[in-house]
Amino acid sequence: MKNQTTVRRLQFTCLFVASILLIFPFFQTPFALQEVSAQTTYQKQPVGQYGTITYEHYRLHETLDGEKIQPTSDKSYLNQTFWIKDSYQKGIEMYYSLENSQGETIGLIQSSSVVLTNDQAEGHKQAIVATKEITTSDLSIFSNFLWQKKDVTDEFVGQKVRLKGAYHHFNGKVYYDTYDLNNKWLGFLSEEAFNEVSETDQSLVNEEIIEEEQEEVIETTETTEQSSQEEVVNEDTVQESTVDVPEQELPVLPMSSYLLGGQIASARVRRIEDHTSLAQPRNFYAATYKNKNEFVEKIAKDAQEVANQYGLYPSVMIAQAILESAYGESQLTKEANNFFGIKFTVGADEGRFGRYDIHSDEFVNGKRVSLAASFRKYPTAKASLEDNGKLLAQGLSWNRTFYQASWRKNAATYKEATKGLTGKYATDPLYDSKLNQLIENWNLSQYD
């Protein structure tokens, strides 16, 4: 009897297991389909920046399923600059959609193959060192990429010059950062000025030679400008002309304004700072303050000037500087003159700002962790104020009116302006209350 019971139990167990095996595929298929579906879902986000393809083994894709629209061996787009319209992200993978100056879609490319250059249509500077002879006359030599003419090539025809960088512009042309043999900067010259310039373009040299050439330029610049650098800096007010020229909002120009060498560039083409400002030595003047009163007094003067220039409330800017820098006592402020915690963007900020690396405490999945972060480094305190003013006035690359609620023309009072910053400039829901309290405590509205 006991044996019969054991046999029945064994039979029942086998029947149960067989049933599970038979119906398991019907449960498995939906989950498998869901997993496949999740793997092919990409989150689309606007980018609205220029970008240069800098990775020599890049691959272009027509769709996100991996279909390539050109052979891997075809490198015709290397170093070219495109308009990055959108990004598509899935996990750690991100692709950019590329458009040329005619608005045609080129394809999709992994973000790691591209350096974003913000609003710099000339793209990422390619480091080269080469000597070439100017062979073409009646060509413009530009001082910047707003096409401000610095000179013409007529008097330089037959002369050898040094090329120390190449810009593959969004309009399809290549422009060279050109110096004479005495390391005097001549300006930006198009590829049409030289014979067989395409060979020079590929003549990359090792980093040691590039650094040696750059050091020569710095030494020459320091020698010629030594007298201006020996000016005494007032200890009470650290005010020096900033390296980064405040960028004005560009007027809407007719299409003819972008005509260059018979080729029409896209109306997206925007300005960059004048080359002379980029070549200046970045002297750093650490701002020091004896106490909180002195900090407020010194910051107030520059903040009033900058805020009025960009249509902002001086009281709000001063309060932001107090709150973000802890009255100038934060390490980031003391060692980088960064009063607002603006971060450094690799590619877009290179050559425009100094870089300061520091570990920053962040919350990840509810836990505080220490992560390496890069911040912009400014030569003076005023330079930091100007960069913050520019950010608030000109917004983000994908939304120029992002901070419009803080503009004086839109905010009737400073309290409306601080409210407009809350949730945008800072995620702290009490950000406006903290700023308002500082404005009241220090009577900062007197500067408005």
Image: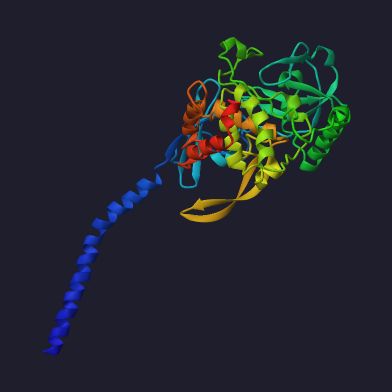
The mark tally for this picture is 0
Residue sitting nearer the eye, 379 or 31: 379
- Residue at 54% in and 55% down: 369
Q: Give left or right: position of 30 versus 74.
A: left
Q: Give left or right: position of 423 versus 8.
A: right
Q: How is the image coloured?
A: rainbow
Question: Which image quadrant for residue 23?
Answer: bottom left
Residue sitting nearer the eye, 302 or 76: 302
Residue 152 x, y percent position in the rendering: 78, 13
Quadrant the C terminus occupies: top right
Question: Which image quadrant for residue 150?
Answer: top right
| Residue 326 in view in this figure | yes
Depicted 136 relative to depicted 415: above or below = above
Residue 138 x, y percent position in the rendering: 76, 10
Residue 72 x, y percent position in the rendering: 57, 38
Residue sitting nearer the eye, 253 or 15: 253
| Residue 391 in view in this figure | no
- Residue at 66% in and 18% down: 146
Residue sitting at the far left? 1
Residue 431 x, y percent position in the rendering: 49, 40
- Residue at 59% in and 23% down: 310
Depicted 82 relative to depicted 432: above or below = above
Depicted 404 relative to depicted 114: above or below = above
Quadrant the N terminus occupies: bottom left
